[in-house]
Image (cartoon, rainbow, N blue to C red):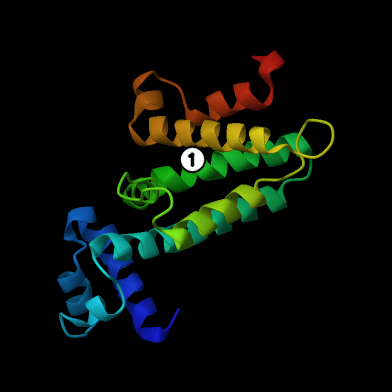
Amino acid sequence: MDGTRTRLVESALRLLREEGLDAVTLRAVGDLAGLSRTAPYRHFADKTALLAALAVRVITDLSAHVAAAVLAAETPRDRLRAFYLSYVEYAVAHPEEYRLVFASEFVVGHHPDLETAIDQVMTALDMEGPWEGPVPKARVMALFSTAHGLAELAVAGQFSHKGIGYSDVVDVLVNPGER
């Protein structure tokens, strides 16, 4: 990414964090970046293209957060637990960013950079777990789907509303026979 484009994406991230998704407009991003209001249009076709670039940035942060947690764990079960917990922790700490990544505006096939970033996360999930042999794609999708569901429920406050922590649910997933 060139310097101006990077500045625009970083400005968009700042607006998203401070004011929410509705505040992220091409004009507002240009203003915050200290550029003309038309500068963003030289780098992004429209707001959706800007948001897709921002989503790639968020996926990169999410991946780094999850990878650090997983790499710090020692056993396969601990890595699986670290994966789930770190994924949900990121979503809870950054709900606007997390929701952006999975926004319905990003139709499959229209944002190749975002799809590549998500595919890289999926590849990174090809971690050793409490199962035998390599991880089939279906298992990776099951892990990702479960983590995404946990994150959505945690962000919505469903676990706290029921008087449990998401870590309790993760423990059931990682050690199903022990709860």
- Residue kind at label 1, given as amino acid type: Val
- Residue 173 horizontal side relative to residue 34, left or right: right
The N terminus - image quarter: bottom left
Q: Specify whether residue 65 is in view.
A: no
- Residue located beneath label 1 in the image: 88
Q: Is residue 110 left or right of residue 141?
A: left
Percent position of residue 39, x then y: 22, 82
The answer to which quarter of the image holds residue 28 is bottom left
Quick check: can you spot residue 130?
yes
Residue sitting at 48 percent across and 43 percent down?
89
Q: Quadrant of residue 129?
A: top right
Coordinates of residue 94 in the picture (x, y in percent): 38, 50
Asked whether 100 or 49 is in front, the reply is 49
Q: Quadrant of the C terminus?
A: top right
Spot occupied by residue 173 in the image (x, y as percentages of width and height): 62, 24
Q: Residue 59 in the image: state x and y as whole percent.
A: 48, 56
Q: For the residue carrying disc 1, how many other residues have a C-alpha within 10 Å: few (<14), some (14-19), or many (20+)?
A: many
Q: Residue at x 72, y 46 (%)?
A: 73
The answer to which of 106 and 88 lies nearer the viewer is 106
